[in-house]
Amino acid sequence: MRTEEGWTPSPGGLVRALWPMLRETGGTWVGWSGEPSSADSTPEGFHVDGVDLLPVPISASELELYYEGFSNDALWPLYHDALRESTYDVDQWEAYRTVNERFAVTLANVAPEDSVVWIHDYQLQLVPAMLRAQRPDLTIGFFLHIPFPPVELFRRLPWRDDVIEHLLGCDLIGFQRPKDVANFAACATDLLHVDHHDGIIENPDHQTRINVFPISIDVEEVEEMAAGRATRQRMSRIRTRLGDPEVVLLGVDRLDYTKGIGLRLRAFAAALEEGRLEAGRHVLVQVATPTREAVEHYQDERAQIERLVGEINGRFSSIGTPVIHYLYQTLPYDELVALYRAGDVMLVTPFRDGMNLVAKEYVASHIDGDGVLVLSEFAGAAEEMVDAVQVNPHDDQALQDAIVQAVEMHRHERRERMAGLRSRLQGSDVEGWANHFLTALRTTR
Ligand code: GDG
């Protein structure tokens, strides 16, 4: 992305995990710059903080067809339990192919002989085979950040065989959960009749390994930020401005229909209605980060959530003390960490989520050893975060009960659960995740 200081990589755990490695190994980061440009342009590579960056151009119309269209209006809903109807459009598919081919050609041109290429996420699923066809010397890995759907759903995709065939161009494919590995194996064997045994798929000229690599966060960085004086001051300022409530409940999500924001708001309102929670004593802060605003499902979701916030505040607030504080904004990361620290109860209630890093960031921020995480069973993070209050977000009553249980939880139990969550998280940070994947990838050949 472009800032006043020039081009910098978008902040985030992935960048933080891979940057030091790329700097050490002299690797190149190939990606979209974040701004549309002519598809024929050949952008210059540049060097930032010891790493070579090479932008791949994507035009405004490709963004609409490839990114907003095929990636986020066909694949994203399909891969998340078909929570919304997917649009299957042949022009979007063609644009997806074209952009994937452009990435493959760019990579084929820059990758040194016999080097390792690591491709990320659902927007680039065709790149592996396209790249292998041009550069069989390369070792190719792919990590899917979102769930891989069960075969009954995946079958709906008109280009289902192409997607699997192209992913099988990899030497290693990493997934978040064992279920994603099983779903992918079932799709590959059912649709393409390939031979699969012990996490290895046999292709005519190579093997593809499939395995689980649950992603994590930069635990140390979040902890350091949480411990800082500025964060502590910010945290107490937040609580004061919220009217010093007994319990601050918190939600932080991209405003995405997979995240279950509406359900959570309704469960909170129902608990107020039934007198299990009380305005003034209990306050909910919901940060909803703007995302994919050009896609209709996202516009609808935003309108529904904002109406709901208005209804609930209208019904339960008094002047100067709303029950829900709603921010449709992207906050600076240090402010987010202060909010995590200020949150006594964190609500992470997606219908489906590859992992969910917010849950991990909340736990890392709670260096005080207190705080309760309410976590959907349908987040990938639920596999590891067994000390959270886990809940089926489709069950209104169970969700309301989980929220009330978290609010009323005795200090002793809160601390015990948080200790369990924190000790598991300490042992699995994003650097370990990246090392684990790359070591597995390097040993595939
Ligand atoms: C995909 C998968 C998987 C959020 N609001 C703000 C902000 N954020 C940051 C959080 C967190 C990240 O965005 C969100 O990560 P999640 O994992 O929760 O969700 P997705 O964006 O859907 O990510 C997911 C992930 O990939 C990684 O593999 O876990 O399942 O869907 O880091 O902190 N950051 C800032 N301001 C905000 O307002 N600065």
Image (spheres, rainbow, N blue to C red):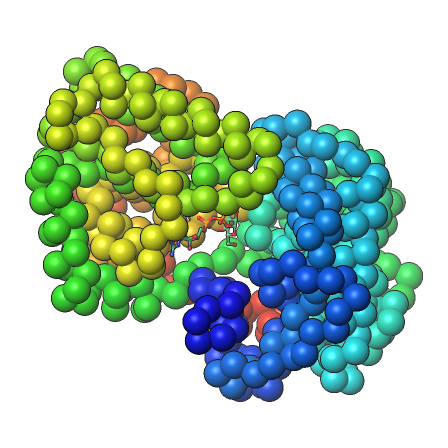
Position of 256 with respect to 78 (left or right) is: left
Position of 204 with respect to 43 (left or right) is: right
Position of 258 with respect to 156 (left or right) is: left
Q: Establish if 182 lies above or below 47.
A: above
Q: Quadrant of the C terminus?
A: bottom right
Residue 253: percent from left, percent from top: 41, 43
Residue 264: percent from left, percent from top: 36, 28
Q: Residue at x 83, y 39 (%)?
A: 90
Numbered label tally: 0
* Observer-nearest of 433 and 70: 70
Q: Quadrant of residue 324?
A: top left
Q: Residue at x 68, y 62 (%)?
A: 37
Residue 203: percent from left, percent from top: 86, 59
* Observer-nearest of 378 and 22: 22
Query: Is residue 373 at all visible to an observer of this figure?
Result: yes
Q: Residue at x 76, y 57 (%)?
A: 99
Q: Residue at x 80, y 44 (%)?
A: 93
Position of 371 with respect to 101 (left or right) is: left
Query: Is residue 167 at all visible to an observer of this figure?
Result: no
Of all residues, the one furthest to the top in this rendering is 274
Residue 313: percent from left, percent from top: 25, 23
Of all residues, the one furthest to the right in this rendering is 204
* Observer-nearest of 18 and 279: 279
